Image (cartoon, helix red, strand yellow):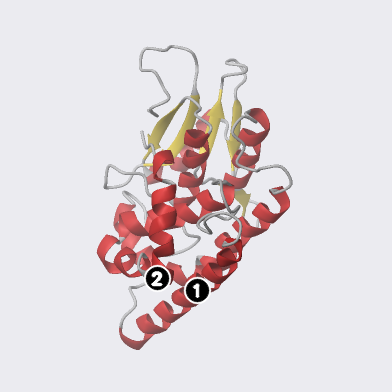
Amino acid sequence: MSRYTSRTNTTPCILLYDLRGTTSQPWAPNIWRIRFILNYKRLRYQTVWLEFHDVENQLRAIGAPPSAFRVDRTPIYTLPVLVDPTKNARAPEILSNTNLIAEFLEATYPARPVFPEGSRAMQTLFVHYIQEVFVQPLLPIMVPLSHPQFRGGTQGAYGGVVPNPLGGPQQEQAWAQVKEQFDFLAMILDKNSGDGDATVAQGREVSYADFSLCSVLIWIERMAPHEVWARIRAWNGGRWARLHERCREYMDEL
């Protein structure tokens, strides 16, 4: 449960479906983005843990919509999924797709906004960049390290078969591409240095953009504290460790 959830309160609360791994800590970055929002907005919620091989059957059973469709139009079921019975317990809202869930939570619970006024378009572009560009060079390094978390399955969460770990010159080339993305993002965020502390995307207050980026940092820190996080946290003058620390108060897990 979240620290904002009373164990004795029987009022319906939000359910967040997450992937159970071999560790006791949540680690999947897309799900962490929603966990951050729930914690930041101080919403009552519980985590429903699913085994990898049970995800599709369980999501179909609760009536969750597919998160995407394959080329042949067969549905794809992935986490996170959010169920909100607080407005109507008999007909709860059931949502999949991280960005759609984020938009729903912001519209339904506008207090403590994660999209400050006038920032939605720019934040959406920032999050798209994190998802589609920034994280790509990390995948050949991080996916093999995350593979042991998949209990009962080896495909699906990253869009394909887990690749073999890198080695030798190939690994160093991958690291160079990762460093290039972190350097570029640091250069962009440094433009806030005259408006706030330059740690967060909006200059002063955390927002959805920061949660999207910090979710990747948590993935790295949880799955590869020595191999990857120890290297990255020191880059760009310790910027990424500062962002991780800035978001720590919103890292409730259960």
Q: Which residue is at the front of the view, 162 or 247?
A: 247
Q: Residues within 10 Å of mark 2 (few under 14, many from 20)?
A: some
Instruction: Find the residue positioned furthest to the front.
Output: 194
Amino acid identity at mark 2: Trp
Q: Who's the residue at 49% across and 77% down the image?
A: 180
In primary-sequence order, the first of circles 2 and 1 is 1
Q: Who's the residue at 65% across and 29% down the image?
A: 108
- Per the image, label 2 sits on a secondary structure element best described as helix
Asked whether disc 2 touches disc 1, contact meaning CB atoms under 8 Å apart, the reply is yes
Instruction: Find the residue positioned furthest to the bottom.
Output: 169
Q: Is residue 26 above or below residue 88?
A: below
Q: Quadrant of the N terminus?
A: top left
Residue 92, x across and y down, in percent: 60, 23
Amino acid identity at mark 1: Asp
Q: How many marks?
A: 2
Q: Which residue is disc 2 drawn over?
A: 235
Q: Is residue 34 above or below residue 90?
A: below
Q: Image check: 187 left or right of 125?
A: left
Can residue 177 be seen from the camera position used here?
Answer: yes
Q: Which residue is at the front of the view, 187 or 109?
A: 187
- Per the image, label 1 sits on a secondary structure element best described as helix
Q: Residues within 10 Å of mark 1 (few under 14, many from 20)?
A: some
Q: Who's the residue at 61% across and 52% down the image?
A: 202
Instruction: Indicate which disc residue 41 carries.
Output: none
Q: Which residue is disc 1 drawn over?
A: 183
Residue 146, x across and y down, in percent: 34, 59
Q: Quadrant of the C terminus?
A: top left
